[in-house]
Amino acid sequence: KAGVTQTPRYLIKTRGQQVTLSCSPISGHRSVSWYQQTPGQGLQFLFEYFSETQRNKGNFPGRFSGRQFSNSRSEMNVSTLELGDSALYLCASSLGGTHGTDTQYFGPGTRLTVL
Amino acid sequence: TQLLEQSPQFLSIQEGENLTVYCNSSSVFSSLQWYRQEPGEGPVLLVTVVTGGEVKKLKRLTFQFGDARKDSSLHITAAQPGDTGLYLCAGLNYGGSQGNLIFGKGTKLSVKP
């Protein structure tokens, strides 16, 4: 069974630009969650999508948005990039029980660098 | 804001030594998970503990959930270089503004041969 895949793996952008990251969950998984990981703040929850609807949202500004397609694939978008957005962005898929109760399977992440 | 504090932040030991990593909070959690993350990869779930006082063993790893469900520990016996990685604890608590799963910042373990 293929794992969670994320594209691209690495990305370099400049301040003010926008970026779209993609996540393909494990087949049959309906929930996709996104996290931001930095050395200073650790792993922070961005949002969770289930059946194309945002089900949970963390404490991030509106510049961070996401969506989920009918095949459960998900994208997240960050607009007007800031230097502080440099991070590893991880997506995790699960079967779809209440967020955090099912085992989450993480992808390898997208390393975003903002210059 | 709920917080999970992990200690130590960094640990460098020799192969064969024992170690304990701690995860503490002032909040009560429904359950607590431990993950290991290796460079270039996402975290992988090691164990979930649910009941206060619960102890789970996974080969050389022993996980304990505190009686009050506010803290947890991970003990590794006879550490091996393959144990090297970032160990993360995550507490489950519904309905918070940070989402249901709160992660600690991790303990970076390096086991030298």
Image (spheres, coloured by chain):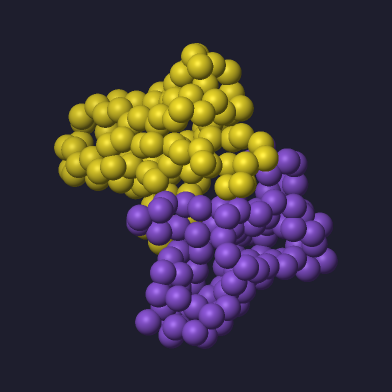
Observer-nearest residue: A26 or B49? B49
B55 lies left or right of A50: left
Residue at 25% x, 43% y is B10
Q: Is residue B21 visible?
A: yes
B82 lies left or right of B27: left
A81 lies left or right of A50: left
Observer-nearest residue: B31 or A8? B31
Residue at 58% x, 18% y is B51
- Does A72 sit above or below residue B82? below
Would you identify the image quadrant in which residue A30 lies? bottom right
Observer-nearest residue: A79 or B66? A79
Pinpoint residue A105: horizontal percent, then vertical percent.
59, 50
- Does A112 sit above or below residue A91? below
- Does A98 sit above or below residue A27? above
Observer-nearest residue: B15 or A58? A58
Residue at 58% x, 65% y is A61
In the rendered structure, the colour chosen for chain B is: yellow
Pinpoint residue A8: horizontal percent, then vertical percent.
53, 75
In the rendered structure, the colour chosen for chain A is: purple
Pinpoint residue A14: horizontal percent, then vertical percent.
43, 85
